[in-house]
Amino acid sequence: MSLGLIGRRALGGLSQSARQYATAAAATAPAVKWSSESTDLINRLRDQQKYYATVLIKGRPFTVTQNDVIIMDRIKELELGDALALNQVTEIGSRDYTIKGQPLVDPSLFKIQATVIEHPDGKLFKVVKKKQRTAHQRTTHHRNHHTMLRISMLDVNKI
């Protein structure tokens, strides 16, 4: 599951299609016993000042850092101010160290939260459908709808 919903809305208010993207934040994998070498490397990553992560949202990868803004396809069930826990991470790292998942990084290693800040409409597209060798022509207009997320927290947990 890629998104965990935190805050104002409960899972009961979401449609069934939205539940595949929004899950309870408490539904994480059980704690893993790490070797001393792995713990040392994770703590070295934790000592870095800035982190980045490659997260999967609705099946698309986004490389994010703290306070980044993501513009993605609209998720109708989300409202302004909703906080999301992003749990599907393929890579997390800093300038010097990187942890790559196989295929995903263990969710107990990090905490990433995003907040919905806007639901903008995209650019207006003009679509012209024309029949060859006739005067028939039909014009329609189309706008894509987006959701803007701000990464409010990106942190590596202490082990």
Image: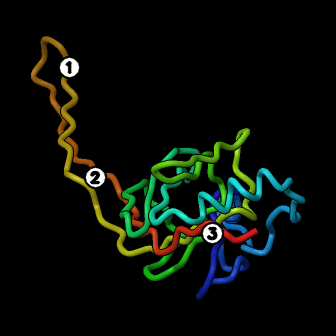
Specify whether 158 is left or right of 113.
right
Residue positioned 73% across, 79% down in the render = 12
Disc 2 or 1, which lies upstream in sequence?
A: 1
Circle 1 Cα neighbour tier, 10 Å, few/some/many (<14 / 14–19 / ≥20):
few
Residue positioned 76% across, 68% down in the render = 159
Per the image, the residue denoted by label 3 is 111
Circle 3 Cα neighbour tier, 10 Å, few/some/many (<14 / 14–19 / ≥20):
some
Q: Amino acid at mark 2?
A: Arg
Specify whether 42 is left or right of 96.
right
- Image coordinates of residue 156 in percent, x first then y, are 62, 66
Specify whether 133 is left or right of 90.
left
Q: Amino acid at mark 1?
A: Lys
Q: Secondary structure at mark 1?
A: loop
Give the residue furthest to the top.
133
- Image coordinates of residue 120 in percent, x first then y, are 30, 66
Specify whether 81 is left or right of 46.
left
Q: CA–CA distance between discs 2 and 1?
A: 24 Å
Tell me the quadrant of the picture where the N terminus can be found.
Answer: bottom right
Disc 2 or 3, which lies upstream in sequence?
A: 3
- Residue 100 sits in quarter: top right
Q: Secondary structure at mark 3?
A: strand
Q: Nearer the viewer, mark 2 or mark 1?
A: 2
Q: Is residue 101 above or below residue 86?
A: above
Give the numbered dot on residue 131.
Answer: 1
